[in-house]
Image (cartoon, helix red, strand yellow):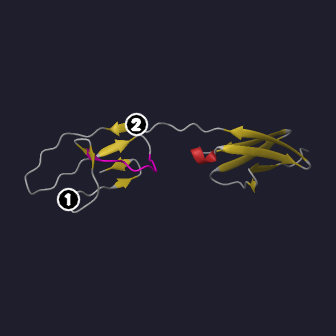
């Protein structure tokens, strides 16, 4: 029988979860990391008894692009207009709205919302 192995990221011992799947078949041990994020980059170690081997995982960030571009809108004076764009992925960086090269800030006139990849 194969000797059991332990997986670590840095000093943290990894446990099976939705994020991490540990496989071991005979003498082959694998760590499967689901739904990669840039935070998953780092050193991963496979430990078996007193022996260990370490490899670095680099996760390249996918550029955020516009999945749905802004559309021209018409509104009545005194009314409300909602501009809507959708990104190719959710981002922690806030979308910045501009009018004629001037960044807009939330106030009584402008309300900004961002949920996942959708910004309004």
Residue assigned mark 1:
109
The magenta segment: 90-98
Neighbor class of circle 2 (other Cα within 10 Å; few <14, some 14-19, many 20+) is: few
Q: Residue 101, position in %: x, y?
A: 26, 41
Which residue does the image show at 29% across and 38% down from the upper left? Answer: 69
* Element on which disc 1 rests: loop
Residue beneath the point at 41% across and 40% down: 88
Decide if residue 37 is in sight here.
no
Q: Position of residue 79 (x, y in %)?
A: 11, 56
The residue labelled by disc 2 is 65
Residue 30 is situated, as x and y percent measured from the top left of the image, at 75, 41
Judge from the rendering whether residue 18 lies leftward or rightward of residue 97; answer left or right: right
- Is there a contact, CB below 8 Å, between mark 2 and mark 1? no
- Residue at 62 percent across and 53 percent down: it is 18
Query: Which of the two discs, 2 and 1, sits closer to the camera?
Result: 1
Q: Is residue 40 magenta?
A: no
**Viewer-closest of 30 and 39:** 39
Magenta stretch encompasses residue 97:
yes
């Amino acid at each position: 029988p194969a000797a059991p192995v332990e997986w670590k990221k840095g000093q943290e011992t990894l446990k099976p979860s939705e994020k991490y799947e540990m496989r071991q078949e005979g003498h082959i041990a694998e760590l499967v990391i689901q739904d990669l994020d840039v935070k998953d980059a780092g050193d991963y170690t496979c430990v078996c008894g007193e022996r260990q081997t370490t490899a670095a995982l680099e996760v390249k960030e996918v550029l955020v692009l516009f999945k749905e571009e802004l559309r021209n809108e018409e509104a009545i004076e005194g009314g409300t207009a909602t501009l809507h764009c959708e990104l190719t992925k959710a981002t922690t960086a806030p979308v910045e709205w501009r009018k004629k090269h001037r960044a807009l800030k939330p106030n009584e006139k402008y309300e900004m919302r961002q949920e996942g990849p959708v910004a309004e």
